[in-house]
Image (tube, helix red, strand yellow):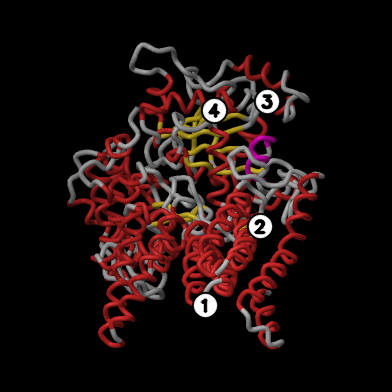
Amino acid sequence: MLLAVTGVLWAWGVDRVDDIGKVIGVVAALLGLPPLVVTAFRLRWGTSAPGGVSLAEAVDLLAEATRRQWEAESRVRRLNDPYPLPVAWNAAGPDVTEDWRLLRTFAEQAPGGPSNDRCHWVDGSEGLSGSGKDIEDVFLQRIPTRRLVVLGEPGSGKTMLLIRLLLALLRPDYRESGGPAPFLFALASFDPTRQDLRTWMTQQLVQEHPELRAPVEGIGTGSGPRDGSVARALVESGRVIPLFDGLDEVPRAFRTHVLQAVNEAFSSHEPLVLSSRTTEYGQTRVPAWDAPAVRLNGVAGIVLQPLGVEEVIKYLARDAGDGHGASTGRWSRVANVLRDDPHSPLAKVLSTPLGLFLARTIYNPRLGESTGAVPHPDDLLFIDRSSQNTVEAHLFRVFVPAAYRPHPFHPCPWSLRQAERYLTFLARHLQSKLAGRPHLAWWQISASFRNRHLILAPGVAGLLISLLAGLLLGWPALGGGVLVVALLCASTVVGTLFSPVYEYSGPNTRIGWLPNPFVAVGAVCGLAAGLALGLPFGLRNAVTTGLAAALVGGLAGGLSANVPTTSAVDSPRDLLAADRRAFIGLWSTGALTAGPVFGYGTRPWLGALCGLAFGTLLATGGALWWRYSVARLLLAARGRLPWRLMHFLNDAHVHRGVLRRVGTVYQFRHLTLQRYLAHPEHPSGERAAGAQRSP
């Protein structure tokens, strides 16, 4: 609008700088004040801000997005190919399960009565045993309180069982419109000493589904963890059924605090599920030091059982082609060894879903792949089989080469050596820079560098370009280039103060205007800058420029890329594109508004510099794309990451099975794989994960 007004003024023959500055200031005021007044009245009377949604609509949107995500992830993980593994379980002992009479009492005394039919309750914990699809009936009907602890050995299928339960709870025959939606939370990223559980849950929801930053209808929006966002309201209103996965992945010193945090955040009648390794859960409940035992209130427990030898043999043979053609007898020698000693370390590793996944990926051909190009299962008979750790270490060591062997339909743009180097760096980045957390988010790649390195890198590049321009065009070009580079670097330094990358921060989806204290701050700063720059050109120009700059600064103070949208962002690539658009939009808006205001009140060249600086300040303060881009280029130049990082991550997820996708972030297929790649000598990762977060 300012550019259009300027063109009209020039067409009318208004050529005096001060006159143009006055008219621009008046027009800017007329354009900027009505939106400010309308927004203020909306907030005053409690009307929802643009994009506001009701909680019933929001939870339905979340349920649909979660269902699509985990159905797609199940296909990528091949959880139902060739058929779902019949994981079985038995009831946990009395040290885990609450006294059954208390469970019935908790459920009967819940507000509104029990959430399920009493006639389906079992008489004791021994009635919880089952397998496969029985998990739905166990959680929904047999347990009075609908609170369950799932225990099992490493790789026994705890996460797989939680995914099956989540998808079952999202089916229309179980879930009514507007009813609570299940959500899988990875506990490895929770630090109970730094935040409360509900705040962390809110941050996880927003990180995986940025559209949940949208304001709740009738509340408006805010900027903190206790604001009126959809995510916070869903958690506080009990419309999210938490499935907490991986208590054992939390550093040992914090596990007891996690159990206590769950007890404090959820009453004994609110449904939830928690999974953990059996030994680690026992150590958490009974601490080694002189402290009282901690028990989750109102829970029943089950313990996953290893798969039988015959089931393992049948599954591997069926996945190899059911004994037809060249695959006939492929697993026969291994099958004989397993039958001869069903309690051997090899049999124990292959009796878990994780071991089966690794074995099928390494030794079974994919569709269209020749058996001659795939390692033979008999290799398992010539490795060190003295312990489960040595067998697992072998499988992890050959898994990545197997995942990146030539694919018949999806050729890999990277060599095996490159892929191993990139994956190792990403695993070490998560372990060392992000304290062992599982979320591999593109906007946290910049955590590998300090802010000054991210700013100095493009600054040095700009100076080299300025030097080249000076040699070709003359020394004035060098001086101008140095001035521009210094100005942009200074603006970026200030912008980084408004967009620090915390471990729970996230990128932005679109630009909007929200009233907040920065409106007044921006107006005051704009007034001061306008007066300072306009005084050398006369008092009238100073006043005109100051008022116009104050208006622009105030409007820019409310301009934000943190305004969410209720339209879902489906993938990390979508979120990256949205944040990039926000960066470009903020920069363009800042440059095109500040440039004319300062330029026509002072000098055109000074206005251009102010526009560049102001646009850079807004863009670097409101979007994270620039951090990611600079960090990616630096790491790619060092050979630690590929130039096309998002393409590499998507390929590792969809075609190689090394990564899994959770919302808008990636994770390694299994946390043990992440820890093995980061520290092959300590694949359990306990030291690496706990070192950064010890109390």
Q: Amino acid at mark 4?
A: Val
- Which residue: 32% across, 81% down? 476
Q: Main secondary structure of the magenta part?
A: helix
Whole-number angstrom distance, CA of label 4 to CA of label 3: 24 Å
Badge number at residue 604? 1
Whole-number angstrom distance, CA of label 1 to CA of label 3: 79 Å
Whole-number angstrom distance, CA of label 3 to CA of label 2: 53 Å
Q: Is residue 403 left or right of residue 263?
A: left
Q: Earlier in the sequence, mark 2 or mark 1?
A: 2
Whole-number angstrom distance, CA of label 4 to CA of label 1: 61 Å
- Which percent across, then down, holds residue 644? 38, 70
Taking 481 as reference, is 181 above or below it?
above
Badge number at residue 406? none
Badge number at residue 121? 3
- Which of the two residues, 91 or 496, is positioned nearer the viewer here? 496
Q: Amino acid at mark 3?
A: Trp
Q: Earlier in the sequence, mark 3 or mark 2?
A: 3
Which numbered disc, 3 or 2, marks the residue closer to the eye?
Answer: 2
Q: Which residue is mark 4?
A: 262
Q: Secondary structure at mark 3?
A: loop
Q: Which residue is mark 2?
A: 513
Q: Secondary structure at mark 4?
A: helix
Q: Earlier in the sequence, mark 4 or mark 1?
A: 4
- Which residue: 30% across, 71% down? 461
The stretch of residues the image draws in magenta is 230-238
Q: Secondary structure at mark 1?
A: helix
Residue 235 located within the stretch drawn in magenta: yes
- Which of the two residues, 500 or 683, is positioned nearer the viewer here? 500
- Which of the two residues, 616 or 32, is positioned nearer the viewer here? 32
Q: Earlier in the sequence, mark 4 or mark 2?
A: 4
Q: Quadrant of residue 684?
A: top left
Q: Quadrant of residue 391?
A: top left
